[in-house]
Amino acid sequence: MRFIAASFPSVWALELLLVLRRERRPWSQAELVAALRASELVVSRALDALVAAGLASLDKEGAVYLPVNEEVDTCIGRTEELYRARPNAVRRAIIAANTGSATAFADAFKLRRGRDD
């Protein structure tokens, strides 16, 4: 679950990676939008996150599944198995990890009462 929470900024990113992993070929953005029934923005952000995490690659031919090493590929395989068996637990792990970051960011902007500025 720690790998899942650290690797996927959204459930969309996980879903996108699993599409790339199942059919290992270059996918155009339009194909991914259609396969996921998502918006171009959602697909673009998910792809950017996966490339940054070393899980996928993007070039002129399209996006492909490309984990940085065999160990990461094994973790992705386990993630896929867990997602099939316990999808809600995986979704909760992703959402909880990202909700904490968003909450911390939002809290940084809260005004504190009683501060002398």
Image: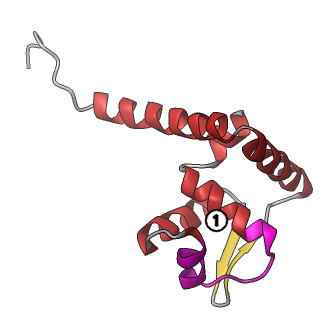
Which quarter of the figure is the C terminus placed in?
A: top left
Task: Identify the residue shown where x is 80% and y is 60%.
Answer: 68
User: Where in the figure is residue 38, as x and y percent of width and height?
Assistant: 48, 68
The overriding secondary structure of the stretch rendered in magenta is helix
Image side of residue 48 versus residue 82, left or right: left
Judged from this view, the residue extending furthest toward the front is 85
Q: Name the residue under label 1.
A: 51
User: Where in the figure is residue 113, as x and y percent of width and height?
Assistant: 12, 13
Task: Identify the residue shown where x is 61% and y is 85%.
Answer: 28
How is the rendered protein coloured?
secondary structure
Q: Quadrant of residue 83?
A: top right
Above or below, 40 relative to 26: above
Task: Identify the residue shown where x is 91% and y is 56%.
Answer: 70
Q: Nearer the viewer, residue 12 or 2?
A: 12
Q: In which quarter of the image is residue 56?
A: bottom right
Determine if the magenta segment contains residue 66: no
Look at label 1 and name its amino acid: Val
Above or below, 55 relative to 8: below
User: Where in the figure is residue 39, as x and y percent of width and height?
Assistant: 43, 71
Image side of residue 104 versus residue 9, left or right: left
Q: Which of 9 and 21 is in front in this view?
A: 21
- What stretch of residues is rendered in magenta? 20-35
